[in-house]
Image (cartoon, rainbow, N blue to C red):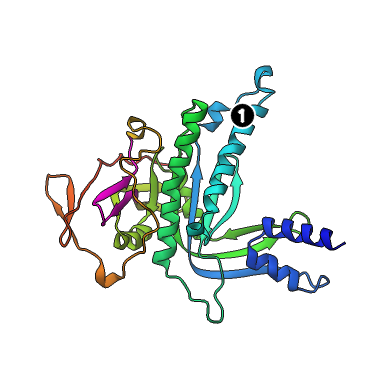
Amino acid sequence: MERVKLDNKRILFNLLPAHVAQHFLMSNPRNMDLYYQSYSQVGVMFASIPNFNDFYIELDGNNMGVECLRLLNEIIADFDELMDKEYYKDIEKIKTIGSTYMAAVGLVPTSGSKAKKSIYSHLSTLADFAIEMFDVLDEINYQSYNDFVLRVGINVGPVVAGVIGARRPQYDIWGNTVNVASRMDSTGVQGKIQVTEEVQRILKRCSYEFVCRGKVSVKGKGEMLTYFLEGKADGNNSQTRSLNLERKMYPYGRANIQTKLGTSCPSVSSVASFTVKPGAGQVSATHTNQTLHYLPSVPAVKEA
């Protein structure tokens, strides 16, 4: 009997975030009121593989599409494994929708002596996770001789989180922040991480590089100014871990341009000031020797 209880607890903690699972374990089974929690600042990410639908086909040779789904499962499982890293412990996987991976950061309530992490720290973690997802997919492409591409959208803002359903309960998040994050993905560009102006405003203080895409037509929101997150500069060795449209020019893993992720986000007072050199296509930090190279932006495309 004790073994059954332990197995049920393990399943519950696998289905729901730890703090939510603990809430239900401590609650009276007869009192199953709606569980919900409001958060003021949550980073939300949608990462999709837009060309997976072209890859999926039902033939006798691939067991009527099962082998295609087997590869998709491997991709999603590798993303899950990446999230298991200690550095990404604050990120919560919400769900997968087809070949789209949805995750969020900042959903753990703070209480007692537990220090509340800043939105700068949370968004930095989410941005680093998105960048590493490209490396994971690169490795899978290398091993499976495929050319899947990732397209990511990130937004930040208030959300409501809750558990819906008595059977197979689903933990999810709702709100305008979630809708816009989804639009950042759907209106984005393959091989790019598109973010809102608010995300860019926060992350530019944490050594991340951006290219202004311009205004994009977003359903339900009108014209929105968006940015492409191009990478993260490492002040220690003046290298850049970058995303660009020429990713396939580099060997999978691109060890020559990777930098260590997870470095702490500096406080506002210690952030370097950046100046743009007209016509040079470069941005330089005034108190370091690093030079950050930017790629040309991609013309905005209206959402279908």
Q: Which residues are magenta?
A: 227-245
* Mark 1: amino acid: Cys
Q: Position of residue 92 (x, y in %)?
A: 56, 58
In the picture, measured across the screen, residue 226 lies left or right of residue 66, that is: left
**Residue 125, image x, y percentages:** 44, 58
Secondary structure character of the magenta stretch overall: strand
Q: Is residue 184 visible?
A: no
Q: Secondary structure at mark 1?
A: helix
Q: Where is residue 158 shown, x and y percent of the image?
A: 49, 66
In the image: residue 6, left or right of residue 36: right
> Where on the picture, by quarter, is residue 160?
bottom right
- Name which residue lies at 35% across and 38% down: 254
Number of numbered callouts drawn:
1
The picture quadrant where one finds residue 248 is: top left
Q: Residues within 10 Å of mark 1 (few under 14, many from 20)?
A: some
Q: Residue at x 66, y 59 (%)?
A: 16
Residue identifier under label 1: 68
Where is residue 168 drawn, in percent x and y? 75, 54
Image vertical order of residue 1 relative to residue 37, above or below: above
